[in-house]
Image: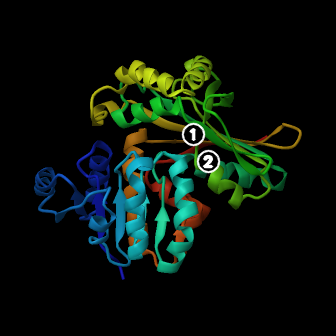
C-alpha cells in the first residue's frame, strides 16, 4: 500500500525546488521542519498542504511523522552534521528515505551503520539521488556496459553548458569551499582509497563544447561506491568536476596549498575566514538563471592498455532543476513500488539500468553521444 510523502527542509532553496517538482507531478507531501510559521505560509501557497513540526537533530520528532511504507525526503544539511538522526528515524520506522546529499562520507556512514538494520525493519534508503550523483552513475553504467568485460578504468566528469557563475546556490558554494579541505574518495586497485581533492586533473571529450576536450579535477562521488559492485570487472573508478574547466589546474594547485594549511586548527580557521566571502547570500538561482545552463556529464572506460573502449555523454536540465525533478521522481517510485530490496541502495540497486534510463529520459537527462573506442 502506498504511504505518504513527507518533505523535510521544504523552506530551503533545494527543498523549494523539490516541492515544486512534487506538486507538478500531482503529489501533495506533508511539509516538516522547525519553522512552523514558514511552513504554514508555504502550505497555504500550495493549496493547503498538511504541515508539522520536526527537528532534523531530534530523531524522535522525525520518527513520530513516519509509518512503515511512508517516504521521507530530506534536503536538510549539511548531512554530515544533521543527516544521521533523520536517516535513523526512517530506518526505525521501516520507511523509505531519499535525500539530496552530495557528501560521499555521509553515504558511506549510512552503509556502515544502517544497511543491516534497514534490512531488518524493511526500510529502503536511497541517498544522493540528485545531480549528485545520478547522472554520473547513469553515464558510467552505460559506458561500462558498452565496454564489456574488457573495461578496467572508468572516469566520470561533471560539466555544464553555459556560464554557471553567478548561478550557484549558497549550499553549493559551501560544499565547494569545504571540498578544499576534505579528501576525495576513489576506487583504485579494487578498493576505496582517499586522496587530496583536486590532486589530479583529467581531460574528457565533450561534444558541443568550445573546445573538443574539457578538464576536471578529482572530487568525491558515489559512483565509486556503487558502480564497482554493478560492474565487478572495473579496477578503478574516479570522479571529476569540470564546472570551471579552464581553472581546473589552478584549482588543483590551490587545493594543495589549502590542504597544507588545513593540517593545523589555526590554519583551518584562517582558511575559513579567507574563503567566507565566496559563500554569498542565502538561496540560489531563479528559474531564468537556471534556464541559461544545462548539465553535461561524460563517462569514459579504458582497458588495461589505456585505450578508450567506450564514451557516453548525457545532457539534461540545469543542475538544481534536475535535482528537484530527480528527487520527486524517485520519491514517487519509492512510494509506489513494492519490489524494492530493503537496505541502503544506489540508483542501479533500486531501479536497474533500464528503469533508471527510462526515468531520467522522462526528466530530460538523455545521451547526446555514445560511442565505442
* The one of 155 and 358 positioned closer to us in this rendering: 155
Residue placed farthest to the bottom in the image?
A: 1
| Secondary structure category for the residue under label 2 | helix
Kindly identify which numbered label has been placed on residue 178: none
Residue 133 in view in this figure? no
How is the protein colored in the picture?
rainbow
Q: Position of residue 182 (x, y in %)?
A: 55, 35
Packing grade of label 2 (10 A; few <14, some 14-19, many >=20) is many
Q: Which residue is mark 2?
A: 139
In the picture, residue 330 is in which quadrant?
bottom left
Q: Position of residue 115 (x, y in %)?
A: 55, 68
Q: Position of residue 206 (x, y in %)?
A: 62, 31
Residue 152 in view in this figure? yes
Kindly identify which numbered label has been placed on residue 297: 1
In the picture, residue 336 is in which quadrant?
bottom left
Q: Residue at x 42, y 60 (%)?
A: 98
| Secondary structure category for the residue under label 1 | strand
Packing grade of label 1 (10 A; few <14, some 14-19, many >=20) is many
* The one of 341 and 27 positioned closer to us in this rendering: 341
Task: Report the number of discs.
Answer: 2
Marks 2 and 1, Cα distance to the nearest angstrom? 7 Å
Residue placed farthest to the right in the image?
A: 305
Q: Position of residue 179 (x, y in %)?
A: 51, 33
Q: Earlier in the sequence, mark 2 or mark 1?
A: 2
Q: Residue at x 62, y 18 (%)?
A: 253
Q: Residue at x 54, y 56 (%)?
A: 109
In the picture, residue 155 is in which quadrant?
top right
Amino acid at each position: 500500500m502506498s504511504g505518504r510523502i513527507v518533505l523535510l527542509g521544504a523552506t530551503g532553496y533545494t527543498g523549494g525546488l523539490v516541492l515544486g517538482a512534487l506538486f507538478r507531478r500531482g503529489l501533495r507531501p506533508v511539509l516538516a521542519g522547525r519553522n512552523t510559521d514558514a511552513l504554514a505560509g508555504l502550505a497555504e501557497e500550495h493549496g493547503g498542504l498538511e504541515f508539522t513540526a520536526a527537528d532534523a537533530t531530534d530523531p524522535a520528532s522525525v520518527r513520530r511523522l513516519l509509518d512503515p511504507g511512508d517516504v521521507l525526503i530530506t534536503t536538510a544539511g549539511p548531512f554530515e552534521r544533521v543527516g544521521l538522526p533523520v536517516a535513523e528515524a526512517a530506518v526505525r520506522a521501516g520507511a523509505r528515505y531519499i535525500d539530496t546529499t552530495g557528501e560521499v562520507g555521509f553515504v558511506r556512514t549510512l552503509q556502515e551503520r544502517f544497511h543491516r538494520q534497514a534490512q531488518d525493519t524493511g526500510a529502503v534508503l536511497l541517498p544522493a539521488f540528485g545531480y549528485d550523483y545520478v547522472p554520473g552513475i547513469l553515464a558510467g553504467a552505460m559506458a561500462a556496459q558498452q565496454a564489456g568485460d574488457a573495461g578496467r578504468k572508468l572516469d566520470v566528469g561533471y560539466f555544464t553548458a553555459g556560464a554557471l557563475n553567478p548561478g550557484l546556490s549558497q549550499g553549493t558554494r559551501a560544499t565547494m569551499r569545504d571540498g578544499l579541505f576534505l579528501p576525495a574518495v576513489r576506487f583504485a586497485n579494487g578498493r576505496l582509497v582517499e586522496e587530496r581533492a583536486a590532486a589530479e586533473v583529467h581531460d574528457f571529450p565533450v561534444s558541443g563544447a568550445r573546445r573538443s576536450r574539457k578538464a576536471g579535477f578529482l572530487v568525491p562521488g558515489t559512483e565509486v561506491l556503487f558502480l564497482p559492485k554493478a560492474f565487478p570487472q572495473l579496477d578503478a573508478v574516479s570522479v571529476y568536476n569540470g564546472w570551471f574547466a579552464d581553472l581546473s589546474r589552478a584549482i588543483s594547485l590551490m587545493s594543495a596549498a589549502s590542504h597544507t594549511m588545513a593540517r593545523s586548527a589555526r590554519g583551518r580557521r584562517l582558511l575559513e575566514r579567507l574563503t567566507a566571502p565566496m559563500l554569498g547570500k542565502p538561496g540560489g538561482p531563479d528559474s531564468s538563471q537556471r534556464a541559461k545552463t544545462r548539465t553535461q556529464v561524460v563517462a569514459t572506460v579504458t582497458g588495461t592498455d589505456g585505450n578508450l573502449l567506450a564514451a557516453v555523454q548525457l545532457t539534461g536540465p540545469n543542475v538544481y532543476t534536475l535535482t528537484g525533478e530527480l528527487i520527486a521522481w524517485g520519491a514517487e517510485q519509492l512510494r509506489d513500488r513494492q519490489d524494492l530490496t530493503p537496505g541502503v541502495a544506489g540508483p542501479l540497486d533500486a531501479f536497474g539500468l533500464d528503469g533508471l534510463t527510462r526515468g531520467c529520459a522522462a526528466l530530460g537527462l538523455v545521451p547526446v553521444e555514445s560511442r565505442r573506442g
